[in-house]
Image (cartoon, helix red, strand yellow):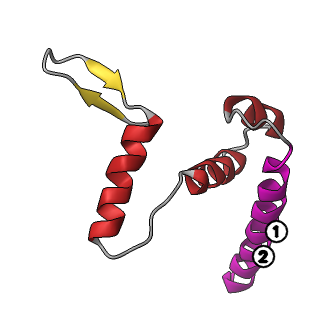
Amino acid sequence: LFSWRNTHGEVRPMTRSAAMGYINQILSTGGFGTSFGHSFRIGGAGFYLGQGVSPEIMHINGRWQSLAYEVYIRAFEQVMNTHTANLAQCYVP
Protein backbone atom coordinates (compact mmCIF):
# COMPACT_ATOMS: atom_id res chain seq x y z
CA LEU A 1 0.00 0.00 0.00
CA PHE A 2 2.74 2.46 0.96
CA SER A 3 6.17 2.74 -0.58
CA TRP A 4 9.05 5.19 -0.72
CA ARG A 5 12.05 5.86 -2.94
CA ASN A 6 15.47 5.42 -1.33
CA THR A 7 18.61 7.48 -2.06
CA HIS A 8 19.44 5.15 -4.98
CA GLY A 9 16.04 5.80 -6.56
CA GLU A 10 14.75 2.32 -5.78
CA VAL A 11 11.13 1.94 -4.72
CA ARG A 12 10.89 0.13 -1.39
CA PRO A 13 7.83 -1.01 0.54
CA MET A 14 7.18 0.95 3.71
CA THR A 15 6.83 -1.10 6.85
CA ARG A 16 3.57 -1.03 8.77
CA SER A 17 5.23 0.61 11.77
CA ALA A 18 6.79 3.37 9.65
CA ALA A 19 3.52 4.03 7.80
CA MET A 20 1.54 4.17 11.04
CA GLY A 21 4.19 6.46 12.53
CA TYR A 22 3.76 8.95 9.69
CA ILE A 23 -0.03 8.68 9.75
CA ASN A 24 -0.18 9.18 13.52
CA GLN A 25 2.19 12.15 13.28
CA ILE A 26 -0.19 13.79 10.80
CA LEU A 27 -3.25 12.91 12.90
CA SER A 28 -1.75 14.28 16.11
CA THR A 29 -0.60 17.47 14.36
CA GLY A 30 -4.21 17.97 13.27
CA GLY A 31 -5.43 17.44 16.82
CA PHE A 32 -6.87 13.98 16.21
CA GLY A 33 -6.29 10.75 18.11
CA THR A 34 -3.91 8.10 16.90
CA SER A 35 -4.72 5.02 14.87
CA PHE A 36 -3.46 1.45 15.20
CA GLY A 37 -4.17 0.61 11.57
CA HIS A 38 -7.18 -1.60 12.18
CA SER A 39 -9.47 0.90 10.48
CA PHE A 40 -7.40 0.51 7.30
CA ARG A 41 -8.01 -3.24 7.33
CA ILE A 42 -11.73 -2.72 7.86
CA GLY A 43 -11.87 -0.11 5.10
CA GLY A 44 -9.89 -2.38 2.79
CA ALA A 45 -12.28 -5.25 3.44
CA GLY A 46 -15.24 -3.03 2.58
CA PHE A 47 -13.53 -1.71 -0.53
CA TYR A 48 -12.72 -5.15 -1.89
CA LEU A 49 -16.18 -6.45 -1.05
CA GLY A 50 -17.61 -3.55 -3.05
CA GLN A 51 -15.33 -4.54 -5.94
CA GLY A 52 -16.76 -8.06 -5.92
CA VAL A 53 -13.76 -9.83 -4.38
CA SER A 54 -14.86 -13.03 -2.67
CA PRO A 55 -14.80 -13.10 1.14
CA GLU A 56 -12.42 -16.09 1.05
CA ILE A 57 -9.85 -14.09 -0.94
CA MET A 58 -10.23 -11.15 1.48
CA HIS A 59 -9.66 -13.53 4.39
CA ILE A 60 -6.44 -14.86 2.87
CA ASN A 61 -5.03 -11.64 1.39
CA GLY A 62 -6.02 -9.57 4.42
CA ARG A 63 -4.20 -12.06 6.65
CA TRP A 64 -7.26 -12.30 8.91
CA GLN A 65 -6.45 -15.02 11.43
CA SER A 66 -10.01 -15.20 12.70
CA LEU A 67 -13.45 -14.88 11.20
CA ALA A 68 -13.80 -11.32 12.55
CA TYR A 69 -13.77 -9.96 9.00
CA GLU A 70 -17.23 -11.50 8.55
CA VAL A 71 -18.64 -8.93 11.00
CA TYR A 72 -17.33 -6.12 8.78
CA ILE A 73 -18.64 -7.81 5.65
CA ARG A 74 -22.15 -8.06 7.11
CA ALA A 75 -22.05 -4.45 8.30
CA PHE A 76 -20.82 -3.28 4.89
CA GLU A 77 -23.54 -5.23 3.08
CA GLN A 78 -26.21 -3.73 5.34
CA VAL A 79 -24.98 -0.17 4.76
CA MET A 80 -24.61 -0.76 1.03
CA ASN A 81 -28.12 -2.20 0.74
CA THR A 82 -29.60 0.74 2.65
CA HIS A 83 -27.85 3.30 0.46
CA THR A 84 -28.68 1.44 -2.73
CA ALA A 85 -32.36 1.42 -1.75
CA ASN A 86 -32.18 5.16 -1.03
CA LEU A 87 -30.60 5.81 -4.43
CA ALA A 88 -33.36 3.84 -6.15
CA GLN A 89 -35.94 6.12 -4.51
CA CYS A 90 -34.16 9.20 -5.87
CA TYR A 91 -34.45 8.04 -9.48
CA VAL A 92 -37.42 9.49 -11.31
CA PRO A 93 -37.85 8.24 -14.91
What's the magenta region? 67-93
Closer-to-camera residue (79/88): 79
Q: Is residue 12 left or right of residue 50?
A: left
Tag 2 secondary structure: helix
Q: Residue at 75% across / 62% down in the picture? A: 76
Q: Residues within 10 Å of mark 1 (few under 14, many from 20)?
A: few
Q: Residue at 77% across / 57% down in the picture? A: 72
Above or below: residue 51 compared with residue 78:
above
Residue 62, which numbered label? none
In the rendered image, residue 81 lying in the magenta stretch gets the answer yes
Q: Residues within 10 Å of mark 2 (few under 14, many from 20)?
A: few
Q: CA distance from mark 2 to mark 1?
A: 6 Å
Q: Quadrant of the N terminus?
A: top left
Q: Please name the amino acid that badge 2 sits on.
A: Thr
Above or below: residue 75 compared with residue 51:
below
Identify the residue position indicated by label 2 in the image: 82
Identify the residue position indicated by label 1 in the image: 78
Q: Please name the amino acid that badge 1 sits on.
A: Gln
